[in-house]
Image (cartoon, rainbow, N blue to C red):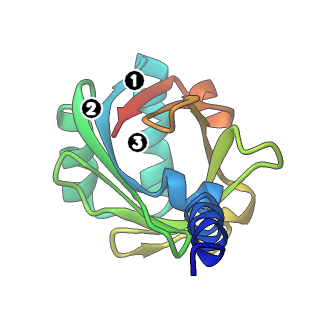
Amino acid sequence: MKQLLPIALLAVLIISGCSSPEKKLAGSFSGTIEFTEEGKNQVIAMMKQLQAPQAEIDKATKDMDGTQVTLDLKEDLSFTLNSGGLPGVTGTWTLNEDGSTAVLKPEVAGTLNLPNSGNQTMEFTISDDNKSLTLTGDARQIGMSIKLNK
């Protein structure tokens, strides 16, 4: 019996240490979103292109800067991104090869399907402790910045 105890302890350590990087990152993050003036104009143009109702456009542009953002990364690799009471964005997420970046692929924004969003992603650099995400990549080029914390 005493000989089995070290083996059992080793098995428990191995199993508990085998949590995938995705499971370690999964959880709820929150922070704020900031836009440059050009970024605000690009969001309005995009919403009009998607034929969003004017009421949604007005609500989205009313208080863009400092809007609270919540990102839920789920273990099943789906996500929900909510901001300022607007209809949420849902989709899937993955990690890049070295696990340093979470890549979000939006599929639905509120009631709007995003059929051509396959190439459109949001990339967040992951902190070493998995407790914060910072927007990087193409989304920053439209004048948007987001920093989220667990």
What percent of the width, then of the height, locates residue 40?
40, 30
What percent of the width, then of the height, locates residue 33?
34, 30
What percent of the width, then of the height, locates residue 6?
62, 65
| 11 is higher (above) or lower (below) than 94 | below
Question: Could you give the CA–CA distance between mark 2 and mark 1, rounded to whole angstroms?
Answer: 7 Å
Q: Residues within 10 Å of mark 2 (few under 14, many from 20)?
A: some
User: Of residues 3 and 72, which is closer to you in this image?
Assistant: 3
Chain-order first, disc 2 or disc 1:
1
Q: In this figure, which residue is indicated by the disc labeled 2? A: 64
| 31 is higher (above) or lower (below) than 52 | above
Answer whether labels 2 and 1 touch (C-beta < 8 Å): yes
Chain-order first, disc 3 or disc 1:
1
Quadrant showing the N terminus: bottom right
Quadrant of residue 111 within the rendered picture: bottom left
User: Of residues 7 and 134, which is closer to you in this image?
Assistant: 7
Q: Which residue type carries mark 1?
A: Phe
Question: Could you give the CA–CA distance between mark 3 and mark 2, rounded to whole angstroms?
Answer: 11 Å
Q: Which residue type carries mark 2?
A: Met
SS of the residue under disc 2: loop
Question: Could you give the CA–CA distance between mark 3 and mark 1, rounded to whole angstroms?
Answer: 12 Å
Quadrant showing the C terminus: top left
- Which residue is farthest bottom? 1
Q: In this figure, which residue is indicated by the disc labeled 1? A: 35
Q: Is residue 105 visible?
A: no
- Which residue is farthest right? 97
SS of the residue under disc 3: helix
Q: Which residue type carries mark 3?
A: Ile
Closer to the camera: disc 3 or disc 1? 1
Closer to the camera: disc 3 or disc 2? 2
47 on left or right of 139 = left
Q: Residues within 10 Å of mark 1 (few under 14, many from 20)?
A: some
